Image: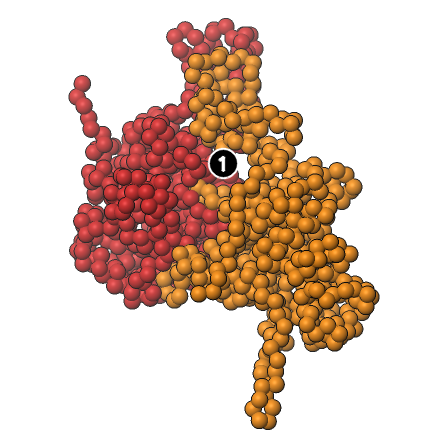
Amino acid sequence: MHYRNIWNEVPQPKVEHTPSRFGRALGKYTVRILDACTDCLKCVAVCPQGVFQTKGNRLAPPLDHLCLGRECAAKPNRCVKNCPVNAIRVGLNPSSKALGDFRWTPDLLMSAWHMAETGKLPSNDLEYRIGGSDGGFDKLRFRFPDTPPIPDMDRSRIDTSVPLNKKNDGRFDIVIPIPIYGGGMSFGSISQITMLSRIRAFAAWGSFTCTGEGGYPEALYPFDDHIITQVATGLFGVKEETIQRVKIVEFKYAQGAKPGLGGHLLGPKVTEAVARIRETVPGSSLFSPFPFHSVYSVEDHKKHIDWIKAINPKGLVSVKVSTPSDVDMVAVGSYYAGAHIIHLDGSYGGTGAAPDVAKKNIAMPIEYAIPKVHNFLVNEGVRDSITLIASGGIRTAFDIAKAIALGADGVVTGTPELVALECVRCHNCESGRGCARGIASTDLELVGLMELQWGTQRIINMLSCWRDQLREILFRLGLRSIRELVGKTEVLAHLDYNSSIPDDDIRSSLV
Amino acid sequence: MPKKYHIDVQPIANRFPVIGRSGIVDWGEGCLKCAKCVKTECVYGVYKNRSFSTSIMGDTIDEFCKSCFRCVQGCPKRLIHKTINPEWESLGDELYGPEIISITWEQAATGKIPVSGAGYGGKFSGDGFDSMWTDMSEIVRPTRDGIHGREYISTVVDLGRRLDKLEFDNEGKLLSQAPLSIRLPLPIVFDVFPFGDLSPRVLSAVVSAAARLETIVFMPYAEVGRYSDLATHIVPLVAADMLNEADLASFRMVEIPDGRETAEALIFLKKQLPNLLVSVRMQALSSPDTIRRMLEYNRLQADVIHYVADEKGHEPGVNEGLHIKDVIKEINSGLLREGLRDQVTFIASGGIAMAEHVVKSILCGANLVGVDIPLLIALECRVCRNCRDGLSCPVSISQINPNWGTQRIVNLIGAWHNQLLEMMGAMGIREARRLRGERGRVMFREDLENDTFAQLFSERNS
């Protein structure tokens, strides 16, 4: 057989069924087969979801994460009633409550897993749009008209692309086909397989992924055209050569989860490989200070952007900042300094490790920052000349669409991709050997739990389902392009301010 | 260079197995006895390290499990499940809920600031302190060094009055005298406990911890005799009619309750014991009458005003009373209006449950805060309040070894101190004294809502 080196290959953005790598997938319902089962296999024939599969002549352990629940199971033509020996029990999965947290509820995790497995929305009653945080995105709803305003619109022609260079300055004219690119996660905080899975999946969709501050490993070279390299305060691994490799360079001023704190990579995590790429000494801890000690004004900031532009004469410059009270001033300052993209990272964003006190309390959630900055840029008359990207707590396609309706051009994500790779949000990325599920770890044994092709495909599938959802949302709003949604807050309602808001479920046409 | 303030934290074990968030439910029935059982492959060695604890008469497995779910997914017979531990879920009350209690235990055991992976997993916002965010500085503000200049961040605060102006005689000689003050290395004092099985062992641990941390502890006068060697770290609470009999010579500060005789007592103390700071303990009420009395004590040269909210941080005895943060804002504004804010020290107590509450109280206008129940939680209290009903303490708190207790409290406050540094570093504020009432470094939810969502969504409703 011909050997394909997938490590260098940009895959196709096609959905392929990619089940859990941990034996039994976690679902909302459990299907238990009692010992009385005679392997008559009647259940296999009656289940509409394929929960029951055969293994030889026998019934395989049920794929209960696909189950539609008790209501379905109790119907006369379905599994429970059709079992001649009454050996099927369907109930709520007792373990599911122990999963996740308020932002990523068990339902949200399981629906993301479903999208990553099948590329489709779950057909049971899992909540796939919002979490349980009781605020922000979780209190916003879409106001879909009762009937689609343009009923004959072809969904597959709805445009979800976003231009990243609105400056018309002769630099790369980059348009990403989906309004999403991957946020920075450094080499060392996640495994190389995780890193490449994200990069390859976003590349498949024609988009980008940021390297984070950990430098630019050689394994990334085949994907140069889909990579954003980060220049952060520690300047680890920043070289003329890496800045010239890419089409977009990102200045990271702060990270939403720990704004104003900088970073600290402990000595034991600075392995030979990490040290080589970061150009440092193995075993000695690395500080990434806050702030850029060479930037104390917008003028200083401009100087840095000019420097990048001089080194990479065609490249775009993105500026990633957190969300302080004067974030609107920061954004306009970045515009005048010459940035192509202003990237706001809200306070509930992801991190490999950060003090809880910082994650919860410092800087404002992204939901407030987006309209604040968008309106300020509009009033300044410069909104059409800069791309506004939002991140920090974007979990679902609905979050993406809401962020855009609040005023962003597009979003950056990170955590959802890790969830697609079966992150359970146990919050232990940093402890001991790192992630027990082999996602955010460099431990050789744990890293071996995941294969590159599997990881890539899971993320491709989720992005595919997201794009379908965005198109469906736009279809129901009668918009032909996602660019028409930017700042269109009248399509949104907020539970604290508005009453009688209809359900915005779009599942019926997408399962 | 002056001596750096350093809190000596040391890991110190719990006496009882920790009540964890989730539990493993593990059925033996139907086990296939696989050669390679998922339990043997646990990344955290949970199944290897579990044991039977006689103190809880149960398995310690849940203390070790970190909820990676690999055994749940991996067992071919699906015999392993996870649940939320009902005992954990029912811990505490609406303020000191299971999350806060767990994280306080952890800090007391390790002395470390809680750090975790992945983004924030909590509610978007909430009541009280959860309806505000602290600011940080991005590009355009000067003099920030983030957390890496943390050794230069000072958490020192002063207790006592300050002069609003200097006075000179006709020959230009300075008439004003420097007022008395007590300097504390951190903006945290220990307040009287609202409940607790407070044996001498417990109080001894608290007083020793206050001494080691170089702060002070408020304590009813009847209790103080036992700890006379640490009197400089104790502030006795004395009823106004007891002042004649009380021996206050060895203390630096005394506290008297707000009442009918307070004004008289203040005048008496100022005259009789000019080297003693006087604090007036008031219920944290925002009523105009309370504020008027507070201003009166200030005029009578009270050095410290100590506002005490109820156990859960609200106005005491008031139905749906204001949260302490809002009371602090009222008091701060009242003092500012009268031009008196800089003259008096203002302590806020009651409902300070986490490190972030210290910073937020000061941002609202307090000079420093008093902490109570978290110190008991450091000693493994479960905030069940059995003691208040005369029932036995599930963790026999009265039996602790005082040295163990001291280190637990030192650990907790050490972790809190580090969190203050984190938050101040992010704000670009290098002095706790400058944090006081610094409203420009805080974002209130109501303001953010008014600036954004209210404008976008509210008019459509009408």
Residue B34 vertical placement versus A338 (above, below): above
Residue A210 is situated, as x and y percent measured from the top left of the image, at: 29, 45
Q: Is residue A170 left or right of residue A484?
A: left
Q: Coloring scheme of the render? A: by chain
Direction bottom: furthest residue: B170
Q: Residue at x 37, y 65 (%)?
A: B140
Q: Is residue A69 left or right of residue A3?
A: right
Q: Which one is in front, A428 or A42? A: A428
Q: Residue at x 47, y 45 (%)?
A: B115
Where does label 1 land, which residue?
Answer: A100
Rendering colour (chain A): red
Q: Which one is in front, A487 or A318? A: A318
Q: Which one is in front, B352 or B256? A: B256
Residue A245 is situated, as x and y percent measured from the top left of the image, at: 19, 47
Q: Is residue B87 left or right of residue A102?
A: right
Residue A305 is situated, as x and y percent measured from the top left of the image, at: 25, 59
Quadrant in which the N terminus of chain A is drawn:
top left
Residue B316 vertical placement versus B290 (above, below): above
Taking the image as drawn, is residue B388 in sight? Answer: yes
Taking the image as drawn, is residue B296 in sight? Answer: no
Q: Residue at x 30, y 39 (%)?
A: A271
Q: Quadrant of residue A158?
A: top left
Q: Quadrant of residue A272?
A: top left
Quadrant in which the C terminus of chain A is drawn:
top left
Direction front: furthest residue: B229
**Badge 1: chain ID:** A
Q: Which one is in front, B279 or A419? A: B279
Residue A426 is situated, as x and y percent measured from the top left of the image, at: 47, 36
Q: Residue at x 44, y 28 (%)?
A: B43
User: Number of marks in the image?
Assistant: 1
Q: Which chain is orange?
A: B
